[in-house]
Image: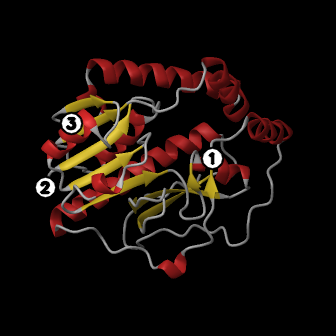
Amino acid sequence: MRLVVATTTDDPLAGVFWDAYTAAGGPAPAAVFLVRPRRARPVWRRAVEGMLIFGAADSIRSMRLARRTALALAQAPERVLAGARVTHRVATLNRGEGLAALERAAPDLLVSAGLPEILKPHVLRLPALGAVNVHNGRLPAYRGLFGTFWEAFCGEEWGYASVHVMAPEVDAGPVLAQGAVRLAGRGLLDALVAKKQQGGRLLAWLVRHVERERALPPPRPAAMDAASAYYGWPSLRDAARFALRRIRGRRPPGPAGTAPAVWPAGVAYAEDRR
């Protein structure tokens, strides 16, 4: 099976994700496409956001992780990206050279992990067995950007990593696998690290399933899904409100029924219950 991964150079926790994927027995991708970030936020804004959302110490830690990951991706991407055999650096996969290279890669399974663009229907039709995305948030309740922030902002006790079928509408495809990570009582950066590890394990399970069965696993029943919402990137006001709660040691009351609900039940998620 030809596994092709579409990701970005702008994820400071990429190494954490792919280390977990490899440790869980995930096969090496035949090709990885590193897509240029769409919107580079100004350095000052990224610094302010980091201080507000993570706090001073974890903000510095996050920046160090980002520099280390960027250097590793520039020098030896195969060491970060699960032993990828071929790496392409492109501006987009929807047209031009990126699309042509993806067509030549002839994917059986296309995986998006932090991809900074919405793939068009003609791209999603290319892989023979399907296209899936790894999302840091419970779906469909937390569609969109920075799901971990919004889960914590809304007072959820548990956050989720989800693997779902890619569809033209953002984060709207059926959920194939979902694992839980405790948010309450821990910093947001630690929660993000735990989610990346969870996502790597989930993806490894799914890829092995597709490799064995030559088909995607059955999706979660639609009856299990909650109401859907779409969240954009947090504003500075949102980040400031979140920081004020953290400083005061307060968190909003979480919604009812926050016990972890993973899918499918037979998968060993190694749930983080700290």
Residue at the image position 70 percent from the left and 48 percent from the top: 185
**Which of the image's four quarters has the N terminus?**
bottom left
The one of 107 and 254 positioned closer to us in this rendering? 107
Query: Earlier along the polypeptide chain: callout 2 or callout 1?
Result: 2
Q: Quadrant of residue 83?
A: top left
178 to the left or right of 215: right
Which residue is label 1 attached to? 232
Query: Earlier along the polypeptide chain: callout 1 or callout 3?
Result: 3
Q: Local crowd at mark 2 within 10 Å, few (<14), some, or many (≥20)? A: some
Q: Secondary structure at mark 1?
A: loop
From this viewpoint, which residue is outermost toward the front?
A: 96
From this viewpoint, which residue is outermost toward the right?
A: 248
Q: Secondary structure at mark 3?
A: loop
Which residue is label 2 attached to? 1
Q: Secondary structure at mark 2?
A: loop
In the picture, the disc for residue 262 is none
Q: Local crowd at mark 1 within 10 Å, few (<14), some, or many (≥20)? A: few
Q: Amino acid at mark 3?
A: Ala
Which residue is label 3 attached to? 84
